[in-house]
Image: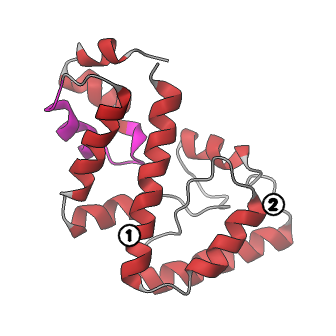
Amino acid sequence: MISIEKINQMEKAEFVSTVGWVFEHSAWVAEKAWESQPVQSKEELLQTMINIVQNAGEPLQIALLRAHPDLGTRLKMSEISKEEQAGVGLDRLSEEEYTEFQGLNQKYVEKFDFPFIMAVKGQNKETILTAMKQRVHNTYEEEFDIALLEVFKIASFRLHDFIC
């Protein structure tokens, strides 16, 4: 864990390497957030980063969504995503469960052109699977908004676990 005071003292490159991972493979969020330093709390840093994403425009938002791995995948993903998915058992799916997750992931991506995103902390594979089955029927606009909110939840969990 690191203090907000230490984060406020960082040069840009160190800041980006320290908190750039909070938004999956999207260090551009941290690069912009550094310009708002110093911040008074981790909540203020999080809100600054959320505001950057909300004001970024749809092309960058889509790129952010697409930077997330499929849930339940066995493909290469960031260490933090591996840990988060392992924490809810997505690394221990049976072949049948894996096939079901992969089929839903494929159906979802074909419909929305970005992966299914859900903050998995506090969830389990059954609640995630249920959400996938329900959300695949949403409109693009609904799901785009939900996906961004889930990204913000993920970032919040990550920052709160990292900054004291």
Relative to 10, is 68 on the left or the right? Answer: right
Residue 122 on image: x %, y %: 68, 48
Three-letter amino acid code of the residue under disc 1:
Asp
Name the residue at 44% across, 44% down. 155
* Residue wearing tag 1: 145
* Residue wearing tag 2: 93
Give the label, 2 or 1, closer to the camera: 1
Three-letter amino acid code of the residue under disc 2:
Leu
Name the residue at 30% across, 33% down. 45
Residue 103, compared with residue 26, is above or below; it is: below
Q: Residues within 10 Å of mark 1 (few under 14, many from 20)?
A: few
Residue reaching furthest to the left: 35
Is residue 4 within the magenta segment? no
Q: Between disc 2 and disc 1, whose residue precedes?
A: 2
Relative to 71, is 52 on the left or the right? Answer: left
Residue 37, compared with residue 147, is above or below; it is: above
